Image (spheres, rainbow, N blue to C red):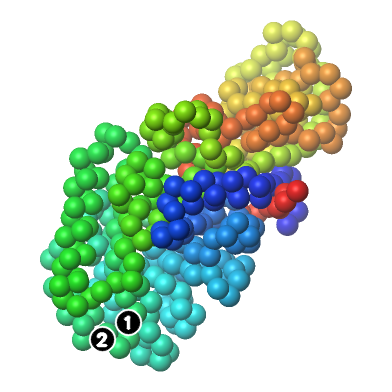
Amino acid sequence: MASTSKITIKSDAIKQNVNFVKSLIGTSTILSAVIKGNAYGHGIPVMVKTFESAGINHFSVYSSPEAKDAFKAKSSNSTIMIMGIICVNDYQWVVENNIEFYVSTLDVLEKAIHYSKKAGVKSHIHIDVETGMNRTGIVFENLKKVVSVINSNIDCLEIIGITSHFAGAESIANHIRIKKQFSVFKKRVKYFEKNNIIPRILHIASSAATINYPDSRLDLVRVGILLYGYWPTKETFIHYIHRRKDKSDPIKRAMTWCSNVILIKVIPESEFIGYGLSFQAQHQMKIMIVPVGYSNGYSRSLSNLGHVIVKGRKAPIVGSVNMNMIICDITNIENVQIGDEVVLIGKQGDQEISFSSFAEMNNSLNYEILARLPENIQRCLDDK
Ligand SMILES: *Cc1c(COP(=O)(O)O)cnc(C)c1O
């Protein structure tokens, strides 16, 4: 797809991150790569292939449209699990293609049974139980009913897993809540087992829980952010590194987002640059224009704040981030030419702009910045 910027994924970084998580969890726990939110902005098609070549064959998505994107890219021995919503028109496709999915309500359970009968194949389900996050999941009051519906339709159902999700395992502030959730989860599992509903696997841990609560790894971990090379929070990194001799970061950011210089200009002293009065040249300046703005996922809150890298040097953004452009100060950077590569996120020479620093400046999360990178930016693989 033609676009004014480009996202490149380093496959060696992904391999390193996958190997790091595998070294934590060992061989008896399955590693499911979470690829919701267009694979955290990295692109589902590119990432499914990259994760597969790094040895992953289990993928977690949020919705059935994401499952379809992943299905097109995956090899025949990879499994897809939908953790969230199935669009009504997609149930048949999901059931027929053995796509696994969460059953979080009685309504979804009934649909699973209905479409299984219709297609003549079993629905592959994970029973999602409410344990204290108070988001999705089967609530206590409905457990008995769910057990009876499952047991009287067991011919239609393959009980793959029982699952839940922690409400913030990345912060010690939530410690008591997380512990309580885990004990509720174990109780719910016992209840199903006592009623002859025996799942093949149990899973509850995301990246943060995989690091902070090793007991919660169980049979499968659903890891997103770590595999792309980011810590869920700085606190999680500190928790991990705390007791280690080697203090270097074991994971590596896989994404580079870059564009090009399209225009260079000299601005006389005391002129305002860009919209309004937010930036005034205090001396004669040289600026460059880069064709990326907030419509391309470059946050407007980085106006007069962010940096890009050109010729291996950091160039500050001057004035506001426009819909399709930013203006950067290159007064002290020599030899910048039209067409030169400009790094928005990632490394060039000795300089790096990380999403984390970006996120701090921007007072938002890695997760948010990554996930809102528009789908129409070209993604490609760097597998040298
Ligand atoms: C997003 C998500 C994950 C992965 O979270 P990370 O912090 O990126 O590892 C796991 N489980 C569920 C249910 C999710 O929604």
374 displayed left or right of 182: right
Q: Is residue 10 above or below residue 123?
A: above
Q: Amino acid at mark 2?
A: Asn
Residue at screen point 15% across, 63% down: 140
Q: Residue under circle 2? A: 153
Residues at marks 2 and 1, CA–CA distance in whole angstroms: 7 Å
Q: Would residue 170 appear left or right of 47 to someone viewing this image?
A: left
Above/below status of 12 relative to 112: above
Foreground residue among 35 and 186 = 186
Asked whether disc 2 touches disc 1, contact meaning CB atoms under 8 Å apart, the reply is: yes
Q: Is residue 190 above or below residue 257?
A: below
Residue hosting label 1: 157
Percent x, y of residue 33: 49, 57
Look at 72% across and 51% down and name the residue there: 383
Callout 2 environment at 10 Å: few (<14), some (14 to 19), or many (20+)?
A: some
Q: Is residue 358 left or right of residue 184?
A: right
